[in-house]
Image (cartoon, rainbow, N blue to C red):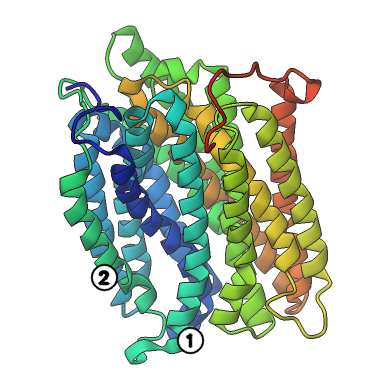
């Protein structure tokens, strides 16, 4: 069937979008809520530093490895079906996390959550990409940015409230169990209100390509997570070295399929598109900086300076509030001057991270929830300016029939970046923490070097694209969105 559009009788794309973003909200809130709970989990289950790192990394690793294949599965089997099945698996895995009795069960349940998230998340942007007319996509993607910020706001605050309240003596467990009613609602409402999009049942799945891609992700992420804490044993170095030929074999496989006119897991046309590739590189760098920062920030605030989970959640709230403001501002520009908006947003984030590194590295004697408010708000505002034009820039060159693959590829590399960022930032943090005899301020200051480098690298890529040389994008004819 033809993809449904806004004008189709009996179809409301905005209602469908709300349900799609509510499902995505579950993933977003889960990431941020877990960071607040890490100190409580560590104490309750007697976890080591490596195990705590894997509570986040197991999810991100499974999520990253599954995004590209499940994005393609959505193109073949139907994006609505994959979205709802992913919600169901994510909800089941959340229950398993909530009832975990040891760290092994929790980590494996988090990996299952990651698979469920990988099933549903690529379908969200893929459906929105096809469902809306070009002039409406800017508003829809800006709404996605607002929902992302709400997830980041709600996670720390809700997590802090649930853990501090110690509901029924369950300590940290309700942070996972809260997903159950939300997931069941999205499934029930989605069956009725999310449209069935066109799919290609004749498409052949590249199982060899899936195996190669998943292996490449594993070869990169696993040694990065474990290497620094273990002193870089030989097998970590060997895995990183093996990732290059495996990745090259994956690319060769996709080119071989393209020459035979067969569907590719990652379309070769996208791999030859310089704009898509540079956009994906910026997505990787951008999202490698944030998750790791919030992981170590929770430990910095709670373990280092004695804030309780609620106070820690309040302390980080200025960041997502800044995202909300930035998303509102950037949404009013529609599809105009997207590269300049990205450059402005990234520059603001870079300045905010330098500010945050200074404040966290020289904390006052009595650190409170307000201490980091200003730099976090600046960083959040910059991120809000950046998200919508960044996603639009990457996806605007993806044809509708490959929307699932394009969205899955972008988000897969986003999560590879996130997993790598978590590993690098947490390693920098723990290595300096142990080397400095428990100096959390020095450890936090050391860890934030990565964020400064990542955002500087994005500005270099933007400069290479011609943005910083004054070549502004030609103006669009449509009215500014939101007016």
The N terminus - image quarter: top left
Q: Which dot marks residue 164?
A: 1
Q: Position of residue 87 (x, y in %)?
A: 26, 54
Above or below, comparing residue 399 to residue 369 in the picture: above
Residue 265 occupies quadrant: top left
Q: Picture coordinates of residue 383 (x, y %)?
A: 63, 48
Q: Which residue is mark 2?
A: 95
Which residue sits at x=47%, y=20%? Answer: 397
Q: Quadrant of residue 479?
A: top right
Question: How far across and down, in percent of the image, does residue 414 sit?
Answer: 50, 42
Residue 5 is situated, as x and y percent measured from the top left of the image, at 28, 27
**Residue under the image location 32 percent in, 58 percent down:** 113
Q: Residue at x 16, y 47 (%)?
A: 192
Q: Is residue 433 visible?
A: yes
Check disc 2 and report its element: helix, strand or loop. helix
Q: Write the residue at 80% across / 20% down.
A: 469
Count of numbered circles in the view: 2
Mark 2 packing: few (<14 Cα in 10 Å), some, or many (20+)? some
Q: Are marks 1 and 2 in contact (CB under 8 Å)?
A: no
Going from N to C along the chain, the mark reached first, 1 or 2, is 2
Q: Nearer the viewer, mark 1 or mark 2?
A: 1
Q: SS at mark 1?
A: helix
Q: Nearer the viewer, residue 242 or 357?
A: 357
The answer to whether residue 47 is visible is no
């Amino acid at each position: 069937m033809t993809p449904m559009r806004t004008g189709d009788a009996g179809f409301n794309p905005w209602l469908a979008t709300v349900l799609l973003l509510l499902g995505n909200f579950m993933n977003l809130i889960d990431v941020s809520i877990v960071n607040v709970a890490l100190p409580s989990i560590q104490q309750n289950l007697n976890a080591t530093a490596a195990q705590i790192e894997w509570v986040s990394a197991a999810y991100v690793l499974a999520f990253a490895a599954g995004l590209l294949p499940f994005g393609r599965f959505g193109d073949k089997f139907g994006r609505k079906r994959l979205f709802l099945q992913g919600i169901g698996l994510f909800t089941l895995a959340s229950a398993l996390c909530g009832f975990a009795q040891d760290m092994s069960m929790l980590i494996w349940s988090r990996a299952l959550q990651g698979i469920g998230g990988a099933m549903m998340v690529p379908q969200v942007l893929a459906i929105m990409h096809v469902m809306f007319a070009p002039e409406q996509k800017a508003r829809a993607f800006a709404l996605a940015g607002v929902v992302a910020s709400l997830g980041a706001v709600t996670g720390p605050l809700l997590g802090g409230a649930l853990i501090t309240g110690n509901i029924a003596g369950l300590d940290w467990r309700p942070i996972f169990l809260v997903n159950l009613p939300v997931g069941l609602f999205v499934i029930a409402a989605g069956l009725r209100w999310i449209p069935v999009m066109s799919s290609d049942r004749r498409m052949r799945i590249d199982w060899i390509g899936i195996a190669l891609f998943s292996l490449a992700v594993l070869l990169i992420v696993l040694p990065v997570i474990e290497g620094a804490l273990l002193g870089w044993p030989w097998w970590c170095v060997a895995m990183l070295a093996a990732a290059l030929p495996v990745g090259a074999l994956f690319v060769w496989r996709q080119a071989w399929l393209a020459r035979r006119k067969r569907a590719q897991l990652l379309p070769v046309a996208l791999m030859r598109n310089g704009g898509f590739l540079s956009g994906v590189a910026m997505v990787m760098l951008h999202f490698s900086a944030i998750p790791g920062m919030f992981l170590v920030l929770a430990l910095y605030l709670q373990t280092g300076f004695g804030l309780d989970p609620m106070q820690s959640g309040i302390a980080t709230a200025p960041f997502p509030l800044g995202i909300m403001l930035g998303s509102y501002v950037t949404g009013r520009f529609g599809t105009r001057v997207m590269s300049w908006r990205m450059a402005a947003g990234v520059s603001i984030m870079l300045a905010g991270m330098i500010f945050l590194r200074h404040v966290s590295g020289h904390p006052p004697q009595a650190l409170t929830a307000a201490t980091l408010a200003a730099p976090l708000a600046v960083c959040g505002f910059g991120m809000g300016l950046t998200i919508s034009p960044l996603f639009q820039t990457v996806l605007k060159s993806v044809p509708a029939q490959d929307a699932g693959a394009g969205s899955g590829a972008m988000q897969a590399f986003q999560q590879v970046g996130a997993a790598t960022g978590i590993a690098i930032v947490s390693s920098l943090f723990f290595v300096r923490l142990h080397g400095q005899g428990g100096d959390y301020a020095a450890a936090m200051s050391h860890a934030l070097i990565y964020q400064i480098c990542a955002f500087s690298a994005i500005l270099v890529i933007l400069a290479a694209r011609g943005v910083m040389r004054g070549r502004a994008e030609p103006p669009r004819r449509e009215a500014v969105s939101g007016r």
